[in-house]
Amino acid sequence: MHAFNLPRKEGSKMSALVIRGGQRLVGEVDVAGSKNTALAILSAVVLAEGKIVLHNVPAVSDTRIKARLLEKFGAVTQWEGSTLHVDCTHLHDGDADEETVRSIRTSFYLLGPLVARLGRVTLPAPGGCKIGARPVDYHLKGLALLGATVNLEGGIYSASTMGLRGAEIYLDTPSAGATQHLMSAAATADGITTIDNAALEPEIVALAAFLNSLGARIEGAGTSKITIQGVKKLSGGTFTIPADRMQAGTYLLAGAITHGDVTVRGILPETQTAVINKLREAGAEVTEGADWVRVVVNKRLKAINVITMPHPGFPTDMQQPMAALLTLAKGTSLVEETVYESRIGHVPELNRMGAKIKLINGKSAMIDGVTKLQGAVVEASDLRAGAALVLAGLAASGETVVKNVIFIDRGYERLEQTLTSLGADIKRVEVHETELA
Ligand code: EPU
């Protein structure tokens, strides 16, 4: 599989990360803004009839692509470091090309806000990391309840409405994306919308805060019932994206897997509760302050069981990196994935490095801890599998080459620079595929 679903060109150049493992990571890091919050906000921005200034937007490929996609609908975007200016004053139904739309999952979350704003819109079906079927049925049912007619023909969604109206929406499971999408679409609908069994993720709280800062009237974000009192229109505004909890969690795990001492600053520790508790259970020393978390590991960790759940349960996005950590823990760990059907691309690659992982039911991992991993040439199959392989490479003896960095670049800003600042030996190289075969 190749990034963005594009066919791979024979002999084409690609980036790889070369890691010489065995360095103990020590130090303090800041993390970039949250990718998933930024992506949700970059769908909602089309509702604003004024200029939006977003600070702390992570410079990852998904946010760049999303900004380019907005331009296809008439938005004017401009990057200034990590600040993104977006002006959606003059929007039109776009010529969003399939390649751009398919390269990220959240392109689809534009459908509701765009139909709310324009009355009619067409959008190719979405893509994103291949970690399961990732249906969009909750989104479609919710949009229908809000009064949009949505058709799919030839891989293109077309949506139209005479005007969205408030509705009572119930989600069969608390989907983060459906909650974000429908909450945004309902912000300017006529009347009151309720979303029951809503997702509780911090990204939803941040999105509601953003929309409210533009004049929306949303209550209950962060609880399982969200109430949206539709307003006539949203204005422009300025918003700062909070830190990325998945990047933060990954650096904490990097500290743990290298038996290091890593402090991640500028984060909300309560968004790390599940990861912190699991690290403690495995034997790591974890301390936290108002906006930082520190992990110290001085001895071999012990095996634990982890089960992924919607927030505030253990995040599926940390499942693969956590599995990498547990490959070296003493005893047998069970890592159960319940959110996605197929988030397992890290398993064969970690086994190439000497891990002993067996798949159960095609989606959960039984991990027999080994005392060491050996460097190998491995391939990232998706964003978090890539992060897991980097973590394994940091702890492995010898050299690890992680191919398909393009996946990691979707969600980690300055990954190798951050790890280098903690003492890792990691560099990015451009190679011909045949050189690594
Ligand atoms: N689902 C349905 N029908 C729907 C929507 C979702 O069955 O209409 C199912 C999905 O197939 C999945 C589960 O519900 O099995 C959860 O999906 P959810 O909608 O919560 O996920 P998402 O919005 O597609 C976001 C993040 C993911 C993260 C999940 C869960 C973004 C851009 N993506 O995806 O992040 O894993 O929430 O927390 O916000 C990542 O960053 O690596 C990543 C994949």
Image (spheres, rainbow, N blue to C red):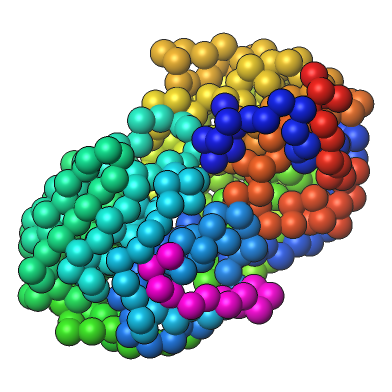
Number of marks: 0
Front-most of 262 and 173?
173
Q: Quadrant of the N terminus?
A: top right
Q: Quadrant of the C terminus?
A: top right
Front-most of 50 and 222?
50
Q: Is residue 436 magenta?
A: no
Asked whether residue 54 is in view, the answer is no
Question: Residue 404: where, in percent of width, then height?
Answer: 69, 35
Front-most of 313 and 61?
61
Question: Residue 29: where, in percent of width, then height?
Answer: 75, 62
Asked whether residue 25 is in view, the answer is yes
The reply, left or right, for residue 339 in relation to residue 349 is left
339 is higher (above) or lower (below) than 93: above
Residue 356 occupies quadrant: top right
Q: Is residue 83 magenta?
A: yes
Residue 260 occupies quadrant: top right
Question: Residue 58: where, in percent of width, then height?
Answer: 61, 64
322 is higher (above) or lower (below) than 107: above
Q: Residue at x 77, y 40 (%)?
A: 15
The reply, left or right, for residue 340 in relation to residue 297 is left
Magenta segment, which residues?
72-84
The reply, left or right, for residue 269 in relation to residue 398 is left
Residue 254 occupies quadrant: top right
Farthest front residue in view: 95
Question: Residue 135: where, in percent of width, then height?
Answer: 29, 37
Q: Residue at x 28, y 52 (%)?
A: 178
78 is higher (above) or lower (below) than 347: below
Q: Residue at x 8, y 69 (%)?
A: 162
